[in-house]
Image (cartoon, coloured by chain):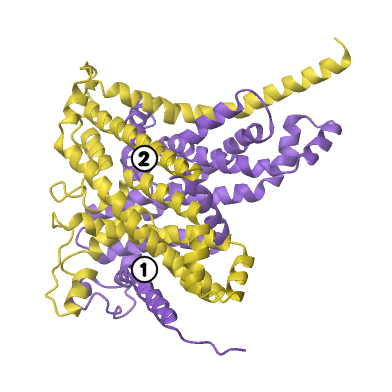
Amino acid sequence: MKKKKITIGKIIAGILAIVWLFVTGAPFYFMVASAFKEQFELFTSGVFAMPKGFYLDNLKEVIESNFPSYLLNSLTVVAISLVLILITASFASYPFSRFKFKLNKPLFAVVVAAMAVPIHVTLLPVFQLTQKIGLYDSIAALIGPYVAFNLPISVFILTSFMAEIPNELEESAEIDGCGKFRTFFNIILPLSKPGLATLAIYNSVNMWNEFSFALVLTQSPKSRTLPLSIWEYQGQYQANIPLIMAVLTFSAIPMIIAFAIGQDKLIKGMMAGAVKG
Amino acid sequence: MNAARSLSYNKKRNTAIVSTVFLVPVFFFITVFIIYPIADSFWLSLHEWNGISSNRNFIGLENWKVLLTDSVFYKAFFNNIIIVILSIIIQLPIAMAIAFFLDVGGKKLNILKMIYFLPMLMSSVAVGFLFRYAYDPQFGIISAIDTLFGGEGMVDLLGNTTYAIYAVIAVICWQFIPFYMVYFLAGLSSIPVELYEAAIIDGATRGQYFWKIALPSMKGTIKSAAVLSLVGSLKYFDLIYVMTQGGPNGATELMATYMYKNAFQIMKMGYGSTVASAMFIIITAIALLTLKAINGKEEA
């Protein structure tokens, strides 16, 4: 065996890695460390100083504020929208991936084109629509846009996923007298589980962090989601930076947990979602 | 009708029914929340309307005429372009370097990989707030670093009309480099191992492998990353809205923030729609041109 040589390349790579670790880590450290500081402490001790002790009042204050209800709103919106997305996307992907009919390609093209639409073009009309049908300022107002804007990419991914399921399975089911509906529910859907899981995680992260629609379609604390709540704390506790850092830390935790659990699937989803732009 | 014909007829009909039933929901959502709003946006752009009163004034192309001479819109568009260019120039090479480092390092660098990935998990709003305070002149990170190097602190990047846009771009890079890192990592791992082994047996160094083999075989990945960055940069909103609201004095105004301000803050719904529609046209045109340019080159 050759001895491992330390080359200049390796040293440069090592330095780059450490520099990048600092670039990524410093803001996170700033956020979490500040969350444990007293307001006064932040001004007197240095920015990068460790907190003197674990000062938990910020966290307590966040938990005792509206935070839990914002959390619940976010969970509700994401859960309902996600179920709708998964059902609608798997329905649509089935004919797109497995049937030959005249309108297949043009209709699929419409779905693909919808991926590129910037949401800001739709904000104002959707805002008015929501007011007209009386859903404005409710979490229900968010479900429609969330489903619509996550569907195209979901259909796109799931269609290519379903296209890879071998035809033989379907054919033998047909010979055994299975109709299209039963084939879908009993064969295609169960086999699409891994694709659905990827979509579930990817879409959840998207919706969990969504800001523009939540900003425009909701107004009062009772219907605001987590990203909007940060906005509100900022208005209320402008000078209380440790408290705001505590809110930020709290709001990041669910995603970090989701990442820890579904790391592979999240990355797969992001890769697939990359076509969205 | 004989039995065989009716069987195939039945099958066809069955397919048609299933397709219709299964495709209706998706097109319901797309029509109501995407297609109709686009059309409505263009229609609204022909009106003058404050969003409250019941009468909208049809004014034809008046809003579009205003837009064409609106220096704020041009400024916003120009800012979007700066972000596009700098994003691609800064993000992609750094992301590539990190991805190659992680790829060569293999599994033992998994912890680094996870830490590098963290910014991707925060919402743009959270990132925006975090950096608004990190940039704070009194107790922010930048001021702290400045004092560390003997400066006086009190560096106010976001309040400076010249530097604000670059300060914002730095945050955008911080947030999205991890994304392209993962993207390139996947690209690198899809290069066949045999290629690497063959190169090493032939006596290639890692550097030679990177420049002569890895980079050329990732052409497609790099191109799509560039397109992604391009289209994404034209749509930025959340982060900027939270950090600067387009300020100071329009220094970080973007098409999307300008649209939001017109439509929802000063209640010029018609003009807001005009900005939104213009944004739609610009993004669609640039995306199509870029795709065409990229595909065209491939054929040559």
**In screen coordinates, is A233 left or right of B96?**
left
Q: Would you place residue A183 above or below residue B183 in this image?
A: above
Please tell me which of labels 2 and 1 falls first in the chain. Answer: 1
Farthest residue, direction right: B3
Q: Position of residue B32 (x, y in %)?
A: 45, 27
Q: Position of residue B175 (x, y in %)?
A: 36, 59
Q: Which residue is mark 1?
A: A24
Secondary element under disc 1, as helix, strand or loop, is: helix
Quarter of the rendering containing residue B172? bottom left
Q: Would you place residue A206 above or below residue B202 in this image?
A: above
Q: Are marks 2 and 1 in contact (CB under 8 Å)?
A: no
Quarter of the rendering containing residue B41? top left
- Which quarter shows the N terminus of chain A? bottom right
**Within 10 angstroms of label 2, few (less than 14), some, or many (20 or more) residues?**
many
Q: Which label was assigned to residue A213?
A: 2
Farthest residue, direction top: B1
- Which quarter shows the C terminus of chain A? top left
Residue shown at 35% from the left, 65% from the top: A60
Q: Which chain shows up in purple?
A: A
Query: Label 1 lies in what chain?
Result: A
Q: Nearer the viewer, residue B78 or A171?
A: B78
**Within 10 angstroms of label 1, few (less than 14), some, or many (20 or more) residues?**
some
Q: Can residue A123 be seen at all in this image of the molecule?
A: no
**In screen coordinates, is A122 left or right of B27?**
left
Q: Can residue A224 be seen at all in this image of the molecule?
A: yes
Residue shown at 22% from the left, 75% from the top: B145
CA distance separating discs 2 and 1:
29 Å
Residue shown at 43% from the left, 30% from the top: B33
Q: Would you place residue B282 above or below residue A193 in this image?
A: above
Residue shown at 42% from the left, 67% from the top: B97
